């Protein structure tokens, strides 16, 4: 899975096809299930920009419009969040649900683009217009039709999906499209895994029993926020924006390590009692320390909550967050040794509902719209990962505005990569660019050293096990 942003995504020109969803025969039913915590936060700040995630993959030949229309309809019916919507009601937000069998999909006349740049701009505008947070549908269902090789592409408002969902959607659509191309009936989804509905997950979240006010995990959360004056921590280097200011979003997408280097770094981190993610966090703390940002890096990191089998293949925003402090040492091995136990403790804190943390704080108003965070996804373990390279699968995010730095680390068969978003100011570009260069240098140096050690004292037991994927965004 190639993780990128819409300003870096330039598909070959062709004819852009978009399927509209007619809900005129599907009377919406108001649901008693409230938005999830993530959805509530997202919807509360969703007035002035479109925050969406998109997925794309390649298929041979021209688009079979009948088959893709049926595939999109089956995808909507399969995932509960895709036949639900949010609407404002007074000062609140309510969920509405639609009968998916009453929905009708129709492909609109195509729009042709003569160049990849023109296609990117047309697609970007279409995604911004379709993937709005309120109303139904909150997504774009499309394709770029070409005679020899076409692209299936769809985007969704963030309230309905997370990064993990992009892999599920690619896997489902790939299966459904190819099945419908070879059959005239509507049973293409029957051999996909059974799943639960994210709407049911939201109901369970709303009924979750609160933990005790004296629970050590909750107290640890409160200490973490107390150290930052009751606010989430911010990126410790100058980004060129003050409180209440935003700037256009800057983007950096780069590969950190190739597959061999990534395996070597994974083994190095394990020998030092940590995971690959812990090693990268240690490198980040060391980079910040080198650049004058202080000896400790405090941040939130997203964790997926797909802990039950019904949710493994379900589309939705299945994430929570955990707090961690990472000490910037002068040596990555020492840093990993310290970060490993801290990361394991932080994962346990992720079991505390964030809504309860905020209630215990008496509420809080972040000093920035964005929240400084570092996400990690091992795409190799996600549904459909074995096809990602063959079908050129992409996870594409929008580009809007920013007032803090956020980082998404992705591991694939191609190694380790990082996508960054930050305020596109002179200070922001200098700080984040210098920070990423330092992280790159620290990881590369550690990998070279680890490779030399491995040549002398080979590790026993074969290849590295894959960590459980942890992903999602706190905001955006």
Image: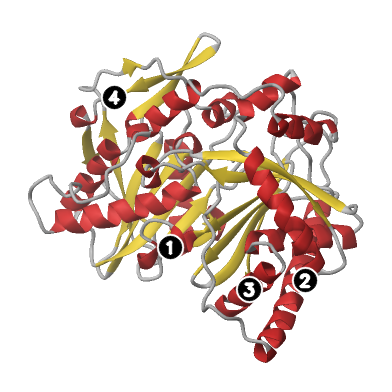
Q: Measuring from the top left, give residue 314's x and y in whole percent.
A: 37, 42
- What residue appears at the point 77 percent right and 68 percent down from the top-left corner? 437
Quadrant containing the C terminus is top right
Mark before the other along the chain sequence, 4 or 3: 4
- Disc 2 on helix, strand or loop? helix
Q: Residue furthest bottom?
A: 456
Mark before the other along the chain sequence, 2 or 3: 3
The residue that label 4 is drawn on is 98
Q: Measuring from the top left, give residue 368's x and y in whole percent.
A: 75, 34
Left or right of 290, for residue 220 = left
- What residue appears at the point 69 percent right and 51 percent down from the top-left corner? 343
The answer to whether residue 129 is above or below residue 455 is above
How far is mark 4 from mark 1, CA to CA?
A: 33 Å
Mark before the other along the chain sequence, 4 or 1: 1
Of badges 4 and 3, nearer the viewer stands 3
Of badges 4 and 1, nearer the viewer stands 4
Identify the disc placed on residue 267: 3
How far is mark 4 from mark 3, CA to CA?
A: 49 Å
Identify the disc placed on residue 442: 2
- Disc 3 on helix, strand or loop? helix
Residue nearer the viewer, 426 or 321 = 321
């Amino acid at each position: 899975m190639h993780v990128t942003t819409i300003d870096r995504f330039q598909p070959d020109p062709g004819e852009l096809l978009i399927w509209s969803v007619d809900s005129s025969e599907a009377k919406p039913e108001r649901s008693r299930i409230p938005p999830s915590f993530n959805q509530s936060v997202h919807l509360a700040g969703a007035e002035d920009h479109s925050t969406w995630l998109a997925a794309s993959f390649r298929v041979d030949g021209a688009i079979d419009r009948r088959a893709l229309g049926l595939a999109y309809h089956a995808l909507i019916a399969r995932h509960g969040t895709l036949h639900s919507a949010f609407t404002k009601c007074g000062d609140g937000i309510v969920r509405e649900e639609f009968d998916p069998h009453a929905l009708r999909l129709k492909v609109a006349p195509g729009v042709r683009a003569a160049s990849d740049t023109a296609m990117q701009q047309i697609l970007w505008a279409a995604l911004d217009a379709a993937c709005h947070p309120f109303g139904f549908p909150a997504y774009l269902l499309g394709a770029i039709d070409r005679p020899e090789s076409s692209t299936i592409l769809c985007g969704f408002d963030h309230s309905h999906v997370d990064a993990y969902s992009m892999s599920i959607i690619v896997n489902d659509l790939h299966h459904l499209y190819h099945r419908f191309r070879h059959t005239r009936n509507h049973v293409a989804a029957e051999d996909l895994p059974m799943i639960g509905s994210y709407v049911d997950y939201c109901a369970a979240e709303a009924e979750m029993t609160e933990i005790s006010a004296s629970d050590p995990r909750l107290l640890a959360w409160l200490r973490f926020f107390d150290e930052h004056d009751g606010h989430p921590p911010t990126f410790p280097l100058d980004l060129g924006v003050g409180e209440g200011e935003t700037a256009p979003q800057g983007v950096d997408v780069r590969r950190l390590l190739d597959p061999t280097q990534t395996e070597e770094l994974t083994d190095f981190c394990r020998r030092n009692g940590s995971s690959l993610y812990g090693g990268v966090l240690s490198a980040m703390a060391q980079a910040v320390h080198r650049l004058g940002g202080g000896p400790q890096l405090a941040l939130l990191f997203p964790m997926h909550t797909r802990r039950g089998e019904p949710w493994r293949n379900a589309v939705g925003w299945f994430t929570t967050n955990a707090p961690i402090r990472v000490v910037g040492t002068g040596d990555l091995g020492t840093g990993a040794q310290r970060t490993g136990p801290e990361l394991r403790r932080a994962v346990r804190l992720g079991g505390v509902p964030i809504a309860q943390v905020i209630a215990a704080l008496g509420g809080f108003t972040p000093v920035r719209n964005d929240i400084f965070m570092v996400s990690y996804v091992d795409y190799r373990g996600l549904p459909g990962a074995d096809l990602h390279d063959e079908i050129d699968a992409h996870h594409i995010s929008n580009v809007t505005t920013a007032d803090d730095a956020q980082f998404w680390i992705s591991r694939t068969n191609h190694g380790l990569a990082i996508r960054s978003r930050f305020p596109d100011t002179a200070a922001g570009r200098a700080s984040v660019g210098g920070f990423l260069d330092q992280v790159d240098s620290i990881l590369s140096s550690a990998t070279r050293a680890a490779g030399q050690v491995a040549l002398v004292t080979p590790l026993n037991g074969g290849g590295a096990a894959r960590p459980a994927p942890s992903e999602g965004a706190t905001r955006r």
